[in-house]
Amino acid sequence: MPAALLTEEVIARTAPLYERVRRVIPPVEWPAFANDIDAILRLKRERNAIVLAHNYQTPEIFHCVADVVGDSLALAREAMTAEADVIVLAGVHFMAETAKLLNPGKRVLIPDLEAGCSLAASITAADVRLLRERYPGAPVVAYVNTSAAVKAASDICCTSGNARRIVEALGAPRVIMIPDEYLARNVARETGVEIIAWAGHCEVHERFTAAEIRELRSRYPGITVLAHPECPPEVVAEADFAGSTAAMSDYVGRKKPPRVVLVTECSMSDNVAVHHPEIEFVRPCNLCPHMKRITLANIRRALETLRHEVTIDPAVAAGARRAVERMLEL
Ligand code: 13P
Ligand code: SF4
């Protein structure tokens, strides 16, 4: 909505929110956000709704309208215990499906049905069944970045925050881990377990290279490099630390490196930088086109129209829920 239509009341109501993000959103951009933010806050009250936002959402969503923020694991946990009538998932489709699986009585909305994931799109349930036939007896660990049908065809889920623990807890000499080849290879190196991988990749993290990290180190002396485990193993090998988006954020908060690069999706640095003005963030920018489909405008529309509601095929719901719940129990 154009700035001219902003009322004095909206400006006053949203002023404290702008204070949170003024280091990462220039004043000239704020009027374009303020009306939607104000409307979303009102609609959340009217609908008894909450917004769960992934760490890759843009700062005006992450810091101004989200009730809960975090990595895939944290969002799944929060969804499970949420008491609101409506859950809006500011993230991608598999996250909304996971929320619905864990709290089936709630209305779960995704603001854009096309917000997918290259990993989730890389494998089908039929592929999982073929892998089982080829490697009989090997348990199947499905990354949460998969469809409900793929989860149902698997034994247990994992996220980047618990992949190592899940694989170790299975106690099997050989594990099928799908669909992220790089996460699987990174976990194999950490655990020593033989891992059968699938050739799926995250289209954001696969673009980082080891040469790029070496170049960053020579251009920014003393820089601390934190990488997401969806990056190729040779990139992870160049990093000081590898972990989920939440683990990277915690690392920055705990160790406060004076200069840091988060080798992951761009918005993550903006969101973490808001809390750490004293830290220099170097930002090679790889955007996730799926995460970026979520905007204030479509969150507002989702709350106004109660669309798009996420449903799960009853034929796979019970199996998929079991795989996610097994992960949370471990
Ligand atoms: P986490 O936030 O669980 O680390 O996952 C990253 C990711 O790519 C989600 O799409
Ligand atoms: Fe999928 Fe990668 Fe985007 Fe995450 S960042 S949603 S893994 S494509």
Image: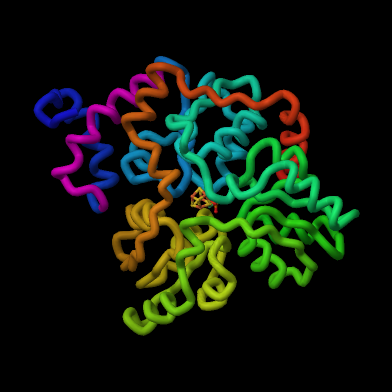
Q: Is residue 175 magenta?
A: no
Q: Is residue 42 magenta?
A: yes
Residue ID at (68%, 26%) = 313
Q: In this orientation, which residue lies closer to the viewer: 40 or 100?
A: 100
Q: In this orientation, which residue lies closer to the viewer: 18 or 181?
A: 181
The answer to whether residue 272 shows anywhere in this view is no
In magenta, the rendered stretch is: 24-45
Which quarter of the image is occupied by the N terminus? top left
Q: Is residue 47 left or right of residue 147?
A: left
Quarter where residue 90 is shown: top left
Residue ID at (26%, 52%) = 24
Q: In this orientation, which residue lies closer to the viewer: 181 or 239?
A: 181
Above or below for 109 versus 261: above
Colour setting? rainbow
- Give the percent coordinates (x, y) of residue 322: 77, 36
Above or below for 26 versus 64: below
Outermost residue to the right? 137
Quarter where residue 263 is shown: bottom left
Above or below for 22 versus 204: above
- Give the percent coordinates (x, y) of residue 144: 64, 46
Q: Is residue 16 left or right of residue 166?
A: left
The answer to whether residue 14 shows anywhere in this view is yes
